[in-house]
Structure formats: C-alpha cells, structure tokens
Image: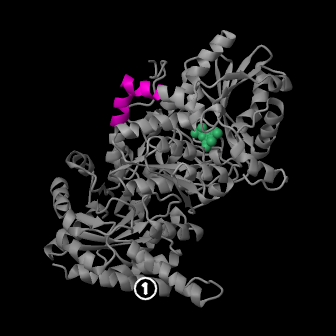
Amino acid sequence: MTVSRIDARFAALKSENRAAFIAYVMAGDPDLDTTFEILKGLPAAGADLIELGFPFSDPMAEGPTIQHAAERSLKAGTKIRDVFELVRRFREVDETTPLILMGYMNPVEFLGYDAWAARMAQVGADGMIVVDCPPEEADGLADALDAQDVALIRLVTPTSDTERLKTLVKRTRGFVYYVSVTGVTGVKEINVAAIQDEVAKVREAAQLPVAVGFGIRTAERAAEVARIADGAVVGSALVDEIKLALSRSEALEPTKKLPDSQAASAKVLEKAAILAQAVRSAR
Amino acid sequence: MNDLRPNTYSQPDAKGRFGEFGGLYVPETLMPLVLELNAAWQSAKADPTFWAEYHSLLKHFVGRPSPLYLAERLTAHHGGAKIYFKREELNHTGAHKINNCIGQILLARRMGRTRIIAETGAGQHGVASATVCAKFDLPLVVYMGATDVERQAPNVFRMKLMGAEVTPVTAGNGTLKDALNEALRDWVTNVDDTYYMIGTAAGMHPYPEMVRDFQTVIGKETREQILEQEGRLPDAVIACIGGGSNAIGMFHPFIDDETVQIVGVEAAGHGLEVYNGHSASLNGGRPGVLHGNRTYLLQDDDGQILEGHSISAGLDYPGIGPEHAHLFKTGRARYITATDDEALEAFQLTSKLEGIIPALESSHAIARVGELAREIGKDGIVVLNLSGRGDKDIATVSKRLGLGGISA
Ligand SMILES: Cc1ncc(COP(=O)(O)O)c(C=O)c1O
C-alpha cells in the first residue's frame, strides 16, 4: 500500500471531479483516546486524507493553536511510539484513507531514518511531511522512505521561485503541499485569487496533485481552494475545536477534569463535516 | 586585511557542514532567504571595503582592541600558570556580543533590509543589537524569554532606552530556546523586509560561520598581544560556552597551533547528574537537529528538547554551535563544566581579587581556570576570555547569596 494508497485516492477524486478535503490533527491532543476517536470518525465525516501531527517541543513553524496542541500532547505524556500505535489502530478500521505523518526533524533523527521508515510502513502510514527538512538535507531520509515505499511530501511556498521549484519537486511523491501564506500555521488568512497561478505552476512542475494549506479556516475558503487545487488542508480550525471543548469543560467543572473524549472528538468531527461538505460541493 | 580563515583548518564546507554537524534545516519558506543571506555574506566576506568599515567601527565605536591583562592576584591565588584576561567586558555595551552585531548590521544594510529582529538570553546580545540599530536608525524587535526578562531587568531597560521593542516569550520555560523559536516565527512571517540578527555562532548556515568570523577578532588580537607581551603563544585558551560565539572567537585562530590547548566550559547548573538540571549540551546531550542545524542537544528519551538550566541566562541553551560539536568530536578542543555554585564563587573571587566584576557566563570559565593553570604549571600561560561584565547579574547574585534585593 503506502504511496499507492495516496495515488489511488487522488485518482478516484479526479474521476469524480472533486478536490480532497484533508484534515490535520495533533496526535495525543489532549490525549490519545480522543485522537483515536477523531481518526476513526474522520473518513465518515468526509476527510479524504488525514494528516496526523506528531508532537515536538519546539515547533518553530506553528502558530499558537498548534503550538499549544503539541504542548497539551506532550504534557499528557505522548511518546512517538504512541503515534505509530494510533496509526496501527486506525488501519484496523480503515484500509483506504491515506494517512500522512507531519512534524519536525529531531524525533525522526532520534529514532533513525531506517527505523522510522520501517515503522511507518509496518503500521500503515503512507506519507511524511517534515517541516524543517529542506531538500538539501533530505536525501538520507528520502532514501529510507523510498525503500519502504512511503512518500516524502515536499512543501512549496510563496517564496519558492521557478528555480527553487525544480529542486523541490525532484523527490516528491504522492502530492505536493503548497503553503499558501508566508508565516506560521493558523494566523494569516489565505488569498485564493493570489495563489491560483502558483498552484497551477506547481502542478505542472511536479506532475502531481497539489494540496493547499496553512491559511484555511472557514468553509468558504475551503470551497474556494477546492476550485483551484487538488486538495484543501485544514488544521488549526479543527484543533481550535479541541481547545474550545477543553475551556468549556474547565468552565463547567471546577475540578478541571478533561472532557470525555466523546465531547471533544464530536466537536472536531462536526467541524470537519461542514468543511468536507464545502469542499465536496465546490465544483 | 587578513580577516579570512588564517590557517589550514577550513570549515565549514559549502553546505555549512563542520564535519557531520551544522547544515541548513529550516522551513521551506525561509530557504530562499537563507540562501540569499549566504550569497550576500560570501560577497561581503570577499570585499575589503566591508571589512574596512567593520574595523573602523570596532575601533572608534566599540573601543577595540580590548586589552590583554595579566590577572596577577588571581594567578598568585591559584599558584600555577600566568592567567591573562582578554578584556571583552571593556567593549562598548560590556560584552563580546557587539563584535558580531557590528558585522551583521553592516550586512543587513548591504542587503537593504529595513527591519531587524533578534533573540536574547542574558540580554547582552539584545543590548548590542539595540545599540547598532539605534546607531543605524533601524527598527528592532527583540524576543526574550519571560524568565530572562525578569532575571535580566537592567538589560531590558537598556534595550528599551535605545528604542528597541522587547517581546517577552512565555512558551516553554521562557528562556533562550523559546526566544529563538519566536524569532524564527517572526522571520517566516515577515520575509520581505526583515533581517534576523542571531546572537551566537549557532543556528543554520551561514550563521555559525559568519558569527565566528565576526568574533575571531578576539583570538587574532590575543595572538598579537601575547606575542608582544610574552614573546610566545599561550599554553591554553579557555572560554565559557553558551551557543559558543565568544569561545569560537577566541579558539579559531589557534586551531592550527597544536601546542595551544583549547578548553571550553559548559554550564553544569545544579550538576551534570541532575536530569534537565544543566545546560551542558556536549557533556550531557546527544546529536540531533534544532534551530536549523545538526549539533549536540539536550533531549529526553523520545527526541524532545529539554529546557536545561543555568543560573546564567546567557548559557541557558540546550544546544551548542556546530563547530564546537565538531571540535569536540575530533578531540581538538576539550569541554569541561562548572556548576552554578562554582560560577558564583568565581564571580565573587574575581571581584575581590581583581577589582573586576565578571558576567556570570564568564564566571563559568573563571571557575575552571585555576585547575587548568595548575595543570600547566608555573612557567605556563593561560588566556581566559572575559566575555562580559557582571553588572547585569548583581541582582541575581545578591538574591542567591541571601543579601536581599537590589534595584538595578
Ligand atoms: C557575557 C556573556 N558571555 C557569554 C555568553 C554566551 O554566549 P556565547 O557562548 O555565544 O559566547 C553570553 C550570552 O549572552 C554573554 O552575555
């Protein structure tokens, strides 16, 4: 499976003439059970692909929303092995929805490239995005992932010029992730009209589907993106639902007990369903 | 002008690697900027007019050369080799940090940047940045951990006085690593006009090389001065290590001289044996990737970065510049440690014996210089890089010694 699971999903979407709705959540935020409930429910809520963040102590490209999600996850004691275990459990209930791991380099370095890639293939994770690993430093990791047929998905940004684009698409597999704004996650809002040509250029250069993310918070924006790109990624807006559920439960419960995972996951899935609907009816 | 690497040792390579360390691990949004920065730096490095302006400012604005001073009473106290202080604390703004800021502000101007950002731990780099930004009329935002804002209040005031905006960072423990994260987030967001002035010889290529080259003025002067005063090279040079800029500035011009021992002193905080209780990345960490480079890092058993601890805000960083990682791995330099308590003792001893109040950072090196001097013996010469003055630390020290508050 692995890369071919991603390819198959985008091929199917193309034949239906629609874009993918890609949902991002942070593993272990606020705990592993909640994340599992969310993962389990996302395909039915309309997520075509899933990005699962693995927490890192120093997430330098994240805005406050995902920074805090990583903090909550680490505080709850999430380990990298728990993230792999989440994927394994997800694969018991869903064999077709591609799942991409997303995070930072150091936990990958710590485990070692080969062990990391092997673990991904074992549990059924299909692709990988490493925020702080540009192509210049990626060959070792790319070799390890290739050997397991796991996709290394590259980021292209508004600062990438034509020359740079050539370097970026070289070893990309599965799809290309277009970062729609210069900045951290979840802060600036996307201007879809301004990136339309760029997305087309990236698709042409990579000969792969292009998913757009970083600045999409509303159903309206998601639909706009779905008209010009092959996928719309929403992260912070979903993660915010967890924070909201937490602060509600803190307000209600003087003991500051976490909400039961049903409540937080239900909120995230509700939001995901709205966004998915917008993407599905966009074209 | 002999500002380029003076010796056969030639690191880093074109990819910014010092052996297996260094490199360029940044989000893609920053890649074009960092590559542009590197191109601008390589061109400036080869331009004699750039260095002429740098040296002119060091002389007339910073007050260089800084003296090389025989610390007679400290030497007598320890009863070993002669101990010389390289008096970086006499520089304008009171530390070595200004050497780097002068170089980087000239580069920022050359690149046409109109807004400067910086991170700071002890506040010395923040103050030096604020100083050059005031002088060249450029707006500056300084990111500083909230804990450090508190323990280095006098420097916060100095930065503001010179027109800088100081943004406290509450993420993590509110120390230097968190300030660095926040500065990187600012840079990713403001890519069009902003220059990031990193304060130590760490981070992504070309910063470790560039900051080093701006700090090697320390070691080059030392070389000339010791030849003039003693007619020979020292037996050892010693410096404290935060990110490693004052140390590499002293060490680099001596790397080829096999008779010169090179000794770095890391912060052992509460003790190397205390989990997450020190900032000794080489002695208590392992290789990993953070803040744009591969180097030794303090981390837990899952690859998460630890905060670490040191009484000295300028050493309270879980990483270390990649060139030190390389010198450690190859064995060319030796890295030892000093605890909070040992640094405090050295702080007081130097004040009483020499009439010089050293920065808590530099006090870590002073804490180990006695042993080194005795090891080398009476006829020997040790040069210690006195990286900064301790006025900024008097409140911290007074509190630790139970002498009550000082309003600085
Ligand atoms: C006086 C002084 N010495 C040393 C340091 C440590 O930095 P580095 O290792 O880059 O010299 C600092 C940092 O703030 C400092 O202020």
The segment highlighted magenta reads B39-55
Residue B52 in view in this figure: yes
Q: Position of residue B153 (x, y in %)?
A: 66, 54
Q: Tell me: B179 left or right of B40.
A: right
Q: Position of residue A136 (x, y in %)?
A: 34, 43
The image shows residue B327, relative to residue B158, as above or below, that is above
Label 1, residues with CA under 10 Å away: few <14, some 14-19, many ≥20: some
State the residue in front, B167 or A5.
Answer: B167
Q: Quadrant of the N terminus of chain A?
A: bottom left
The image shows residue B153, relative to residue A265, as above or below, that is above
The residue at the point 44 percent across, 18 percent down is B1
State the residue in front, A255 or B245.
Answer: B245
The residue at the point 49 percent across, 31 percent down is B214
The image shows residue B336, relative to residue A96, as above or below, that is above
Residue B271 in view in this figure: no
Residue type (three-letter) at the residue carrying disc 1: Lys
In which quarter of the view is residue B175 placed?
bottom right
In which quarter of the view is residue B109 placed?
top left
- Which residue is identified by label 1? A267
The image shows residue B239, relative to residue A230, as above or below, that is above
State the residue in front, B141 or B250.
Answer: B141
Question: Magenta stretch containing residue B43, yes or no?
Answer: yes
Q: Assign ligand 1 to one image quadrant.
A: top right
Q: Position of residue A228 (x, y in %)?
A: 18, 69
Question: Magenta stretch containing residue B406, yes or no?
Answer: no
State the residue in front, B75 or A21.
Answer: B75
